Amino acid sequence: MINLLKKIPVYIKIYNNKIEITNLVTGDTVSGLPVKKFSTDRIVISDFNIIQELIRSLLKELFLIKSFLPLQLKILMQQMEKVDGGLSELEKRGLRDLAEQAGGVYVALVDHTRKLSADEALSELIYSK
């Protein structure tokens, strides 16, 4: 059973029109594609509302949320494509806003495209405070 007062570490990877979310405690992973695209040829997040809804639905699937209390999450966000030269301040703000809207009470961002192991992702959440 999920302890609703404990902050659960989650690793969210954003690709062009695809999201992958991993619960860093259990190792369970879900991924999904949007009904309508949220990426364009130029940028990964072009429609905030579509990606936000997909993240919320994947979190519900991952945690099987049936409670009226929202989860408290520690979220590590990583944009996996189109990060040449690092994330812009606008991209960082968008990723942070997405994570906070999804229930992230603590949010850390990764500024490269190398996929992290679960241990590396946990370390990023711990040491990026």
Image: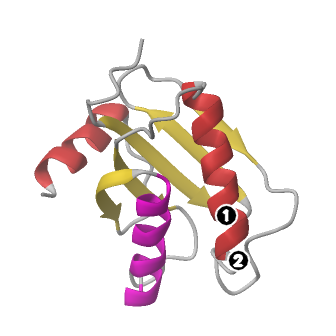
Q: Quadrant of residue 18?
A: bottom right
| Label disc, if present, on residue 94 of the rendered structure | none
Rendered residue at 73%/74% (across/down)? 39
Position of the N terminus, as image quadrant, is: top left
Image location of residue 56, percent across then percent down: 61, 49
Q: Give the SS element for disc 1.
A: helix
Instruction: Report if the CB atoms under discs 2 and 1 are less than 8 Å apart.
Output: yes
Instruction: Say left or right for 97 vs 105.
Output: right
Magenta includes 113? no
The residue under label 2 is 47
Observer-nearest of 58 and 126:
58
Looking at the image, residue 124 lies above or below residue 27: below
- Residue extending furthest top? 1
From the image, give the main secondary structure of the stretch colored magenta: helix
Looking at the image, residue 45 lies above or below residue 72: below
Magenta includes 97? yes
Position of the C terminus, as image quadrant, is: bottom left
Image location of residue 37, percent across then percent down: 82, 68
Q: CA distance from mark 2 to mark 1?
A: 7 Å
Range shown magenta: 88-102
- Residue extending furthest front? 68
Q: Quadrant of residue 108?
A: bottom left
Q: Give the SS element for disc 2.
A: loop
Q: Please state which amino acid type lies under the numbered disc 2.
A: Asp
The residue under label 1 is 51
Q: Is residue 16 visible?
A: no
Rendered residue at 33%/63% (across/down)? 109
Instruction: Say left or right for 10 vs 13.
Output: left
